[in-house]
Image (spheres, rainbow, N blue to C red):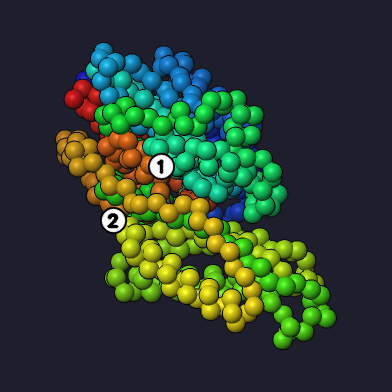
Amino acid sequence: MTLTINTERLLRELDELARITDCPPTQDKSLPEPSRAVTRIVFTPRDLEARAWVKKLATAAGFTIREDAVGNMFLRWEGTDPGLGAVGTGSHTDAIPYAGMYDGTVGVLGALEAMRSLKESGFVPKRALETLVLTSEEPTRFGIGCIGSRLLGGVIDPEAADKMHDRLPETDATAPTGLTLADVRQAAGFHGTLASVKLPIGHYHAWVEVHIEQGPLLEREGVQLGIVTNIAAPASYRYTVEGFGGHAGALLMPDRRDALCAAAEMILSVERHARAANERSGSVDTVATVGMIGVHPGAVNSVPSRVTLMLDIRDTDVARRNSVMYAFHADIAELEQRRGVKVQEEIINADAPAKSSEHIIETVETICREEGVSYKKMVSRAYHDSSFVAAVAPVTMLFIPSRNGVSHRPDEYSTPESIVLGTRVLALALAKLANE
Ligand code: HGY
Ligand code: MN
Ligand code: MN
């Protein structure tokens, strides 16, 4: 089989998809060229426009389309033996505010291109091939990432998921709009129960997702491809800090219970404990971030009475992640006393790390050796849909290098060569796995 990836088509489509965005191109001249800002929040008109656009491409290629109750899209190329477990691939097209154009989209359009190129090369799959567009990989709107793949893997309670509150960043990202996932998904045209989204074990014989590394290692080491051995375990928490507000002039310092000062101590505490965990272990795998904060009432001359903050903490080792939380909780208890504030914690998710399938890793390694592609086995520090597809299928991921290791920013960039190479290795892996 001589396989040719249609480079022009793939790059043109990545460019077209990047134009379906809710934010203007970046004006930040300090960012390296090319830089492209993209905002595409799940179930907004832009997201639905992008989905419709992908469906058009799939139909033109002769693939069938199924959408489930949460809007996961399945673009299927039937195999000669439809009774066998399929081979899945795909990723996401939603993007956090003011992000880059490659996160998720390389995994969707690269997968579509891999399937089309295989078809055009005359390949005939025994097992069906499916490219998935998974719903809400980013946590922006509902506070938790990978809703579509969590439901598909059966790792989130469907009833609880449907009741999750909807938050839109352009209002106050920490304040619910009053709608729920059920309201929003049904308004977008996705009906049925979320319990129906879960796939049975065996639906997929294998799953391979291509994604940008979103880190610096491949570029720094001059390696063409990453083969992911395991995916770090994400956890996220929402905190409400209740203090006592008042007039910024009249409320004297000894009488204050300033919620924002308490929150500031919390942010520095969890950072300190994450750094200490890395020092103790000699690893760099413990990371903690407070990336969202809401201040009430948010007036320059008013002492904050209530603060909401979101913590994202990850590690490849759950016990180490828990040890950071244990130390953080001790600091919270102490500052509650000292500052006279009340801190309420809500666990949004606390996941286990995902392990890749040795067999699929070896399959990809063989292809890299045959193709003369340099590769390294590595951990994924970002979480991905594969983290949760892993609950029902053997998985691995292919990483392509990220310029300067940046992502979730307009200057997120991967070279056309690396995108095409990742797509080519994916296509060869899909072909091998489909005919096992
Ligand atoms: O945050 C993540 O790891 C992913 O990019 N949503
Ligand atoms: Mn992302
Ligand atoms: Mn992603």
From mark 2 to mark 1, how far is it between C-alphas? 35 Å
Residue 307 on image: x %, y %: 65, 65
Residue occupying the point 30% across, 53% down = 379
In this rendering, does residue 167 appear at all?
Answer: yes
Residue occupying the point 47% across, 16% down = 59
Q: Is residue 352 above or below residue 189?
A: below
Residue 197 on image: x %, y %: 45, 30
For residue 296, what is the image quadrant?
A: bottom right
Residue behind mark 2: 221
Front in this rendered view, residue 46 or 128: 128
- Work out which quarter of the rendered image holds the N terminus and state it: top left
Q: Nearer the viewer, mark 2 or mark 1?
A: 1
Mark earlier in primary sequence (2, 1): 1
Residue 223 on image: x %, y %: 27, 49
In this rendering, does residue 12 appear at all?
Answer: no
For residue 387, what is the image quadrant?
A: top left
Element carrying mark 2? helix
* Residue 155, label in figure: 1
Local crowd size for mark 1, using a 10 Å CA cut-off: few (<14), some (14–19), many (≥20): some
Q: Is residue 267 above or below residue 170?
A: below
Q: Is residue 363 left or right of residue 348?
A: left
